Amino acid sequence: MELVLSIAIGVMTSCGVWLILRPRTYQVIVGLSLLSYAVNLFIFGVGGVKSNVPPILEDGIDPSTLSDPVPQALVLTAIVIGFATTALFLVVLLASRGLTGNDHVDGRNDPK
């Protein structure tokens, strides 16, 4: 499971960096979203990958086998903040496109 998680984090990070380096603003926004998802998966992985383990402490359960709730809370907060910043970026993208007439990050048109 750790191998699948690390491969997913690597693929999402590389795709996010590639999209951030693109000239269009929509691609940059999608790249930033992919990078935030990769960071969220990384934080989940830091908390430990455990399946079918209750997060509640009961009698007779070894505390070392429990999943850590702190990374889960951090990722939940990061998801909410990421959604809000993505919505803000999209509003700025639409305003910039309406004012300038193009959606390039550097403000230049496509060379033809």
Image: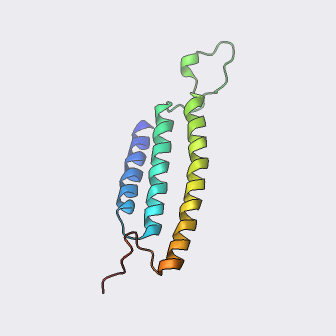
In the image as oriented, which residue stretches furthest toward the top?
60
Picture coordinates of residue 9 (x, y %)? 41, 46
Picture coordinates of residue 102 (x, y %)? 45, 79
Q: Quadrant of residue 69?
A: top right
Q: Nearer the viewer, residue 73 or 3?
A: 73
Residue shown at the point (55%, 58%) measured from the top left: 86
Picture coordinates of residue 65 (x, y %)? 55, 21
Residue shown at the point (63%, 16%) measured from the top left: 61
Q: Nearer the viewer, residue 53 or 19?
A: 19
Q: Quadrant of residue 90?
A: bottom right
In the figure, is residue 57 to the left or right of 104?
Answer: right
Query: If the image is split into quadrants, where does the N terminus sit?
Result: top left
Picture coordinates of residue 17 (x, y %)? 36, 56
Task: Examine the rendered structure and indicate whether residue 11 appears above or below residue 70.
Answer: below
Task: Examine the rendered structure and indicate whether residue 109 appears above or below residue 75.
Answer: below
Task: Examine the rendered structure and indicate whether residue 71 appears above or below residue 36.
Answer: above
